[in-house]
Image: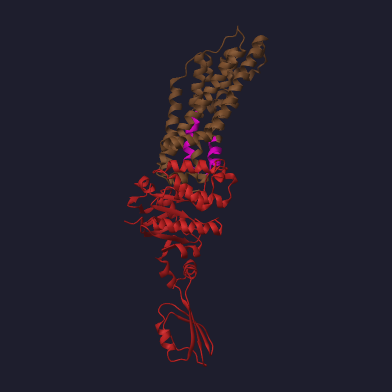
Amino acid sequence: MPAISIRGLTKQYGKQKAVNNLSLDVEEGEILGFLGLNGAGKTTTIRILLDLLRPSSGTAAIFGHDCQSDGLRARSKIGYLPGEMGIFSDLTGRVVLDLLAGLNGSPVDRNMRGELQDRLQLPDSDLRRKLREFSTGMKRKLGLIQAFEGDPPLLILDEPTEGLDPLMQEAFYRLLADVKARGRTVFMSSHVLSEVDRVCDRIALLRKGEMVLLATVEESRHRAARRVRVWFSADVGQPPPLPPGHEIVRADAREWILNVEGLLGPLLGALAALPVKDLEIEEPKLEEVVLKYYRGTPE
Amino acid sequence: MSRFLLLMAHSIRRARTMVLLTGLLLAAFQVMLVFVARFIANSGGFEQLTALLPPFARELMGPYLTSFMSFAGIISAGYIDLGVLGALVAVVVAIGTVPAAEVESGFVDLLLARPLPRRWIITRSILVMLLGTLTMLTMMVLGTWLGLEWLAPRTAKWPTPKLVLSLAANLGLLMLSWGAVALAVGAVSRRRSVASALVGFLAVTGYLLNYVARIWKPARSVAWLSPFRYYAPFDLVMGFSIPLQHVLVLATICILGCAAGYVLFARRDISH
């Protein structure tokens, strides 16, 4: 059973469709990166999963429990980190954690909280302070602790590393690796593509409310052209006609630079008769794929 | 502790300073009124005070004038005073609009991302409002009693316990009806300031409408719309009971406001 199952989900505000006919399964135990520009519909989708927003049509379910009609059961499986921690600033960190832990459906393991505090470097002395004295990063750590401490089967994280320093980002990535090793599922929105590349198994990319890409990180990367540089030991002429997907960036007498989408076979075939001195194939970056989709020009 | 009680305890903690401070101020005001009434009584000034009132004020108060120009009447005035009404309305509106504040701050996201039914947010607000109103009025009644015990002249005729309790009960029902209106508006608002301003405007309009209708006949046709019309302190001071119809109207506003709060909050999209 998928951890998250979304079918034909649409959320409409007047004539504007924030999410349009979205269908998506997130398998148990995977980390799915939910990408898109601001206003693409990521947060709307997350809020529908939490039953904070009601869909105009379609359904969303968490471990088989419909998010709207069986929302309490669905939400008992979730640990949620909002994009912004909306907490009254006159409360201390400890009060917030105790309150939110108490409101969880299942008891919270105090050792787990202690471990999270250690890993995210938020000691008890900080938790005794009022939130108005917290920095952005400290609030983020508090948010991560409240989301992770119940060890829920599904973590929904909205921009989890926003405001964390590089060391804490590393700590967070290790935390993600641990929860994944324990079979937990993570559904995270992010703008940081290097982070998605590093921690996610698959990515789902939204543009103007519609899903334009759903693939593993590896598959996604291969959707971009690879840059191929060829050096020759003797002067050669212009490249021969190549099949679609081959773009000649530069062709000098002793060096060609090409962008190649898809298989390299045709190019290697064309090079077989030429005095090739060296060959360099640059792996495409996830950023290139994603940016292409963001711009709305995927080929 | 059950999860609902935990939510209640959290909300009570957040409201307690405002409620206790207001209750203390109202109690102190009652003590001060007893002091003023003692001063007037000792100087035999009730008749002189009546004579000093301008004609329009006498006309406005009509047969109630004699009852209010007495030791018990002055003390009862604390339950009619505009400042007292304003303070109590402000507190219940603040409590009633807590759901809007929690939506605005995003705190409700953290609450409802957990397995809590939405109706708990409204039920919690209703209970905190009930407790807050009860606490403030109890402190006010205690202030009246303490003031009388400490300061009332031996010869003065005290307001009866029945009168004080009836005034407090009627005032409490009026406050709860405004709280219920605030809850209904707060349940559908994104901004607490907008919800509070709207209910505040309605309260001021309702108060003025009720008074204008006493002296300007055309306004009487719409005065029934004001909840203040169903607050009958003057009748109580004259020795009458609270009209049952008034109690029913205020209770109906309370029930409808709370019901609207449940329905609107259950159906709304929560976004800030």
Which secondary structure type mostly characterizes the magenta part of the structure? helix
Image coordinates for residue A274, horizontal then vertical, percent: 46, 91
Q: Which chain is brown?
A: B
Image quarter where the C terminus of chain A lies is bottom left
Furthest residue toward top: B155
The image shows residue B214 at horizontal and vertical percentages of: 56, 23
Q: Is residue B249 magenta?
A: no
Q: For this rendering, which residue is in front, A260 or A296?
A: A260
Measuring from the top left, give residue A67's x and y in whole percent: 37, 49
Q: Is residue B175 left or right of residue B28?
A: left
In what quadrant of the picture does the N terminus of chain A appear? bottom left
Q: Say which quarter of the image contains residue B260.
A: top left
Over which residues does the magenta segment extend?
B175-199
| In magenta segment, residue B176 | yes
Which chain is depicted red? Answer: A
Q: Nearer the viewer, residue B205 or A70?
A: A70
Q: In x, y percent, where is residue A9? A: 38, 56
Q: Is A238 situated above or below B36?
A: below
Say which residue appears at 52% left-offset and 46% top-offset. A86
On screen, residue A134 above or below B49: below
Q: Is residue B114 left or right of residue A250?
A: left
Q: Is residue B80 left or right of residue A293?
A: right
Query: Can residue B221 be seen?
Result: no
Task: State left or right for residue B4 relative to residue B135.
Answer: left
In the displayed structure, would residue A108 be above or below residue A41?
above
